Image (spheres, helix red, strand yellow):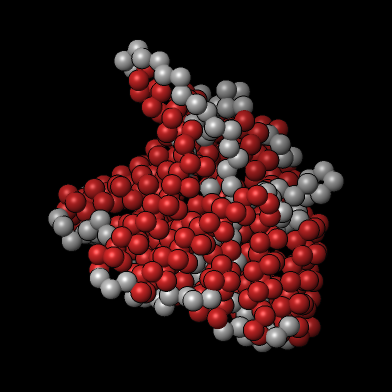
């Protein structure tokens, strides 16, 4: 079930009405039923995988709580991680690994006839697996109690607003909220509704409109070379941002109406002045997950410079592989890791240059230059993320560099890539709206708070206009063919 579907627009109000009508002691059971129904609308049998992950990590929490020695606790943690990651590996990486082994042996002229499994990737498996595993580790570290109520814990793993694409919540935040349900609050519902509208704007009006141009160019990159690919790559940076940010905002809004606070997954990432800062602002729940449960256990930055850089590269390579079973994703992750290592290693040189030329880092021009440089580096890496495979990414880069056609930026050729002139410039206008909102956010101005502080008539006029705007300018598709979210595939 997609957020941007008629099914969800019917499903969610029913969930809210029943949730606040029933007694508190039954609320988590109702949300659990609703969450499993929400997920089973994609593939009912794959709900068994969530149930398996839930049962394993629930049992691990109980066993850790009852264990007498540190060795026993470590054994439980290792078993929980092994079982959960084995399921994730089988469904997501098995064919990729078998193909890689086959290609390796072909280098030595040895042909292996390895099996290929016809598997449908379960929606959101990486998200709910990581969320469940974080609970095991948090109980082991003593940061959260071992939940004794299986059904309440099952809701923590399967809570429908953030089930299939995050944010990856921590038990310290979400599990405690589920244990203490709150009464309906009109102000919270109003704020949640505003978040949902903003999420629909990002997804339906902006991301799906940008996707038309990007898919046209990337889908036939041999025809569209040079500046076509440059423009499409820049636009893809905004497409994936709006698509994923839109999902996260809708999830936050839906949870807010239910009086549950989810973490914010994005913080104006394209206004970052370095790649390191970008990754502190982009997909915050995943970045912090890797920091807490992989980077720090590997030793973090406490075992020397070389080990610190190695740990960072491992984290980004694993992050790339987490996103997809393809060498293009591994290259994307490795490139971002390399950016961070080089940025940190070259910091002394950059400091000397700034001092030598008398530059001021706090000046507007200096910051804009760093924002632009960071965007170019991040956007170049997105090529490997968007391409279907590594060789295709390399071919796209070659076509981007080899074809010289700057005139297409001025002669109207861009209007022949799926969007006519009006729709193209409307897209640019919406991107500017997004960047203004992000700039306000960076300055500590929350636009929805400003709106909610206005008079009654203005608030409802604005909300009504925003709903009409999304309905009129959204990309709905033929016969209301709702477009899926990009991160559902991860």
Q: Above or below — where is 158 with respect to 125?
A: below
Relative to the observer, which residue lies in front, 93 or 79? 79
User: Which residue is the extreme one toward the left?
Assistant: 304
Indicate left or right for 476 with 277 as reference.
Answer: right
User: Which residue is the extreme one toward the top?
Assistant: 109
Relative to the observer, which residue lies in front, 200 or 33? 33
Indicate left or right for 476 with 101 as reference.
Answer: right
In the picture, which quadrant includes the N terminus?
bottom right
Residue 328: give x, y in percent of width and height.
44, 35
Residue 209: give x, y in percent of width and height.
69, 47
Residue 91: give x, y in percent of width and height.
52, 42
Indicate left or right for 304 with 343 as reference.
Answer: left
Q: Above or below — where is 25 with respect to 402?
A: below
Q: Residue at x 46, y 24 (%)?
A: 114
Relative to the observer, which residue lies in front, 421 or 337? 337
Relative to the observer, which residue lies in front, 479 or 241? 479
Q: Above or below — where is 415 with respect to 445?
A: above
Q: Above or below — where is 90 with respect to 202?
A: above
Residue 29: give x, y in percent of width and height.
65, 74
User: Is residue 222 in sight in this rendering?
Assistant: yes
Q: Residue at x 50, y 26 (%)?
A: 115
Residue 159, image quadrant: bottom right
User: Is residue 410 in sight in this rendering?
Assistant: no
In the rendered picture of this protein, how many numbered marks are placed on residues? 0
Q: Residue at x 30, y 47 (%)?
A: 314
Residue 13, image quadrant: bottom right
Indicate left or right for 63 with 324 as reference.
Answer: left
């Amino acid at each position: 079930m997609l957020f941007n579907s008629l099914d969800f627009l019917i499903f969610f109000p029913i969930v809210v009405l029943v949730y606040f009508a029933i007694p508190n002691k039954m609320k988590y059971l109702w949300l659990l039923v609703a969450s499993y129904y929400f997920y089973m609308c994609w593939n009912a049998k794959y709900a068994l995988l969530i149930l398996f992950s839930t049962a394993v990590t629930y049992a691990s929490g109980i066993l850790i709580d009852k264990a007498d020695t540190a060795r026993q606790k470590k054994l439980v943690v290792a078993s929980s991680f092994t079982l959960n990651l084995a399921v994730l590996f089988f469904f997501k990486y098995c064919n990729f690994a078998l193909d890689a082994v086959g290609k390796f042996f072909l280098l030595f002229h040895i042909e292996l006839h390895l099996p290929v499994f016809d598997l449908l990737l379960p929606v959101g498996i990486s998200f709910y697996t990581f969320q469940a595993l974080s609970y095991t580790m948090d109980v082991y570290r003593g940061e959260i109690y071992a939940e004794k109520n299986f059904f309440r814990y099952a809701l923590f793993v399967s809570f429908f607003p953030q089930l299939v694409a995050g944010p990856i919540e921590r038990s310290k935040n979400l599990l405690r909220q589920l244990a203490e349900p709150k009464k309906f609050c009109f102000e919270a519902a109003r704020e949640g509704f505003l978040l949902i509208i903003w999420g629909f704007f990002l997804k339906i009006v902006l991301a799906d409109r940008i996707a038309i141009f990007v898919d046209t160019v990337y889908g036939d990159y041999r025809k569209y070379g040079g500046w076509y690919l440059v423009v499409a790559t820049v636009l893809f940076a905004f497409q994936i941002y709006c698509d994923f940010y839109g999902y996260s905002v809708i999830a936050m809004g839906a949870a807010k109406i239910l009086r549950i606070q989810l973490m914010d997954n994005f913080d104006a990432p394209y206004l970052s002045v370095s790649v390191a800062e970008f990754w502190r602002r982009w997909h915050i729940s995943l970045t912090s997950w890797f920091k807490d449960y992989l980077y720090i256990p590997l030793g973090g930055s406490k075992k020397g410079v070389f080990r610190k850089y190695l740990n960072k590269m491992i984290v980004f390579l694993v992050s790339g592989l987490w996103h997809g079973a393809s060498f293009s994703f591994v290259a994307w992750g490795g490139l971002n890791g390399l950016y961070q290592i080089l940025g940190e290693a070259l910091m002394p040189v950059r400091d000397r240059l700034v001092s030598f030329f008398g530059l001021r880092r706090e000046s507007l021009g200096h910051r804009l230059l760093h924002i632009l440089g960071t965007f170019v580096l991040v956007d170049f890496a997105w090529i490997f993320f968007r391409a279907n495979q590594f060789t295709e990414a390399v071919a796209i880069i070659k076509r981007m560099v080899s074809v010289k056609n700057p005139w297409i930026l001025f002669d109207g050729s861009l209007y022949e890539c799926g969007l006519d002139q009006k729709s193209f410039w409307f897209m640019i206008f919406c991107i500017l709206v997004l960047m203004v909102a992000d700039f306000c956010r960076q300055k500590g101005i929350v636009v929805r708070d400003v709106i909610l502080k206005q008079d009654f008539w203005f608030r409802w006029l604005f909300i009504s206009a925003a709903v009409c705007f999304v309905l009129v300018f959204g990309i709905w598709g033929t016969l209301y063919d709702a477009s899926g979210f990009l991160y559902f595939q991860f």
